[in-house]
Image: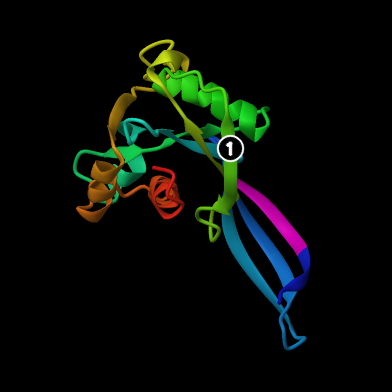
Amino acid sequence: MINDVKILDTQVLSDNWYVLRKITYEYRKKDGSRQQQSREAYDRGNGATILLYNKAQKTVILTRQFRLPSFINGNESGMLIEACAGLLDQDNPEDCIRRETEEETGYKVTDVRKIFEAYMSPGSVTEILHFFIAEYSKAMKVHEGGGVAHEEENIEVLEMPLQQALELIGNGQIKDGKTIMLLQYIKLHNIL
């Protein structure tokens, strides 16, 4: 419906952690008229996420860590249960998710499968997230996980039955969108 977009002005509002820009643009509406708007867009790069699952045990690997934005928005502890994820940096999505999986969970996965891509907050964030799943076994565990010190990560690794993870969605203990999507994907496609 919207095409013929013309960027009129771009201002960097912040580049402290990632880049926040105010962009003024003009686009042609479906009725043919032109409209000018200004919006802010946060560019943190693109990312990847993965859900590890074990068919024999019917379990999944998740993480728990402090997330300041959730704390600011009323999550008393600031802790979120999530699927492993990370920014691509200079890697392709598959290499990124293999690296992040080993750093965060301690598992060195061999066979990852991309299932889809999604924008998680397209009204304000440029990031597209690449979603993966992979089967894991105890033999793939190479260390305890928990993240890397230079990234200031403090991650708890959780292994739980898929059914328990689904119940945590229902009772509000899992509120992370990417994690909910991955758990529902596993359930809907009868992978476990």
Taking the spot 72% from the left edge, 84% from the top edge, the residue there is 30
| Between 150 and 34, the one nearer to me in the picture | 150
Residue 161: percent from the left, percent from the top? Answer: 27, 37
Position of 27 relative to 156 (above/below): below
Is residue 188 something that shows in the picture?
yes
Is residue 20 something that shows in the picture?
no
Residue 124: percent from the left, percent from the top? Answer: 53, 56
Name the quadrant containing residue 60. top left
Taking the spot 33% from the left edge, 36% from the top edge, the residue there is 58
Residue for badge 1: 113
In the image, taking residue 177 as reference, residue 74 lies left or right, namely left
Count neighbours of disc 1 (C-alpha within 10 A) and say few if under 14, some if 14 to 19, many if 20 or more.
Answer: few
Taking the spot 38% from the left edge, 17% from the top edge, the residue there is 138
Location of the N terminus by quadrant is bottom right
Residue numbers of the magenta segment: 7-15
Element assignment for label 1 = strand
Find out whether residue 189 is within the magenta segment.
no
Residue 149: percent from the left, percent from the top? Answer: 42, 14
